[in-house]
Image: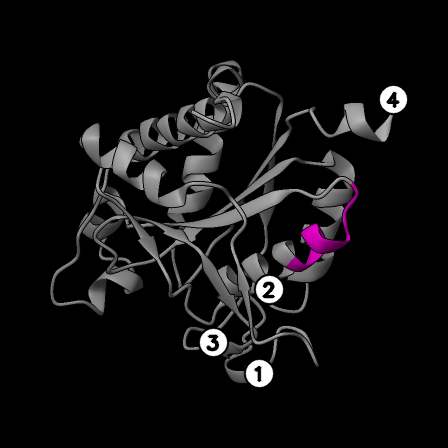
Amino acid sequence: MSARAERVVNRLLLTAFGRFDGGPNCSEALLRLLASDRARLEAAFGGPVAFRLLEVDTEAAERQLAAAIAETRPSHVLLTGQAAGREALSFERVARNRRDLRVADARGQFGALGPVRDGGRETRAASWPDLEGAAAALRALGFPAEVSDDAGAHLCNQTLYLALEAAERASPAFVATFLHLPLTPEQVAAGVPAAARLASCFALPLDDMARAVAAFLVHTRRDRNRPPDA
């Protein structure tokens, strides 16, 4: 296959994180739900979808993400993770070159751990097209959605930074963003540590998250196929 032909093959890599902050991670639950109906998600996106679960491990994150990208050769990378206290599905458009873990990772690493990449640029901009339009489309369907410029300083920010760095080196290049997820009602009812620390906690059902991701991919597919002068 020629490089030109390869560029039009749309492949999605969708990632989530495992257990985090003393409890289950809603992004892992969402990943499993979406993977259980892969055919529907692939129809929404318009191409094959691969699913990968990453450990909440700041030292292993780069290796695991790099392996997933090398194996799947995506055109699009949608990273997902949990963000207690968020009141909307948050599409991140800025990654910063910093690691400051306010909650320990799976190996107990905690606090200011330095940059994601020594000597790397201070920020990287998410390359997924029309995030504002996508968030607006989700709101029109009744889903709480926003575009955020603060991906934090934990592994969510770290993996977005690494994905955008990898995209610069990839041939063909790919686009990426990070989707922060509110907690689920089940997590709040169970009093997981992430919810227990908050005076009140917005929650979003897992089924709603899955429908919102599918709608986001439909928007991406339509935007991808829109004529340049549309």
Q: Amino acid at mark 4?
A: Met
Image spot of residue 87 (x, y percent): 21, 52
Q: Amino acid at mark 3?
A: Leu
Residue 158 position by quadrant:
bottom right
The C terminus: image quadrant = top left
* Label 1 – label 2 distance at C-alpha: 12 Å
Q: Which residue is mark 4?
A: 1
Element type at marker 3? strand
Residues in magenta, as a range: 165-171
Front-most of residues 168 and 35: 168
Q: Which residue is mark 3?
A: 101
Disc sitting over residue 113 in the figure:
1
* Viewer-nearest of discs 4 and 1: 4
* Label 2 – label 3 distance at C-alpha: 11 Å
Q: Amino acid at mark 1?
A: Leu
Element type at marker 2? loop
Q: Residue at x 59, y 44 (%)?
A: 175
Disc sitting over residue 57 in the figure:
2
Q: Residues within 10 Å of mark 1 (few under 14, many from 20)?
A: some
Q: Residues within 10 Å of mark 2 (few under 14, many from 20)?
A: many
Q: Residue furthest right?
A: 1
